[in-house]
Amino acid sequence: MSSAELPELEILRRDLDKEVSGKKIKAVDVPGKKSIARAGTPKALATRLTGVKIERVTRKGTWISLALDSGDVMLVALGAKSRLRRAQNKDALEPGTAVVLTFTQHGQLRLIDPASTAELFLVPSDEVAATIGPLGLDLVDEPVSWTKFGEMVLRRSGKLKSILMDPTMLVGIGAMYSDEILFEAGLRYDRSPDTLSTQEIRRLYRASVEIIHDSVKHGGASVGDDGYLTLSGARGGYSDMINVFRRDGEMSPRARGPIVKSRFGNGYTYYCEQTQV
């Protein structure tokens, strides 16, 4: 999985809120400067964070947002292969460790970013919305009716997979969950919205909501060697429930034929030729 998607980010947000809210930052180390480019120098970041307490952890779209008692907010965006990890002070640094926050009590929070695709920086709390920009529908946080969902889809043009992955349409739906949603809905990735029947729109809506909520319930999905890991380093419990993503050549769960892999944009899409129409 190239980067964290909505269920994994929500699980991470919940775990962080339990683990680091109320903790005071004692020291800041920055082994990887690229990850904090928007924060300025390591010294500038350390100056603003040392002695500051984390009050709560929320999520703004795909951004993890840590509210600080200084009035600033620490924003973290996870990219390909990057993750946040709780650690003890004595634990050896993993390759690619970019930022280490040491608390006055109970260990550290580390940003592991081997591909330098993550971002960590501070903004005043009243500038968070402007910094992040407009967001699409958040299927975890925002209940939506199938009719409103359908209207949003029908206003779009292009292929269904691209529409699901558009962050101004839906927050945090990437290559994996778009494939899983389309398989569950029985729809091909290259269908256009104007070809969908009312029944197909309802199926797409139901699949989108159910898969995202089921994944959150089961701990998210870890796919591949660089897949998502929880804050403690564990694999997600939804991994074994993935039906098509990266399972090309395996028998389809719904048909007597293999899952197919096709080029899509800069990557691939995975689907069942017989049951997705």
Image (spheres, helix red, strand yellow):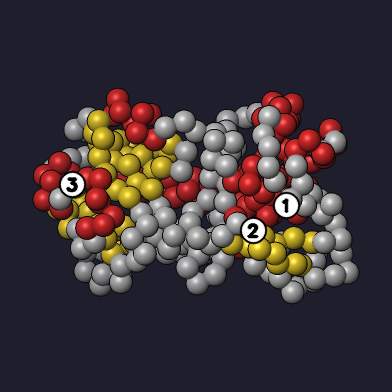
| Closer to viewer: mark 1 or mark 2 | 2
Of 151 and 4, the residue lying toward us: 151
Q: Nearer the viewer, residue 132 or 69?
A: 132
The span from disc 1 to disc 3 (Cα, nearest Å) is 41 Å
Q: CA distance from mark 3 to mark 2?
A: 37 Å
What residue is rendered at 64% in x and 42% in y? 163
Quarter where residue 72 is shown: top left
Name the side, left or right, on which 230 lies relative to 266. left
Q: Amino acid at mark 2?
A: Phe
Q: Which residue is mark 3?
A: 40
Q: Residue under label 2, please give it.
A: 264
Under circle 1, the secondary element is loop
Q: Amino acid at mark 3?
A: Gly
Q: Work out whether 64 lies above or below 108.
A: above
Check if mark 1's residue and mark 2's residue have beta carbons within 8 Å.
yes
Tag 2, which secondary structure? strand
Q: Which residue is mark 1?
A: 189
- Looking at the rendered structure, the secondary structure element under dot 3 is loop
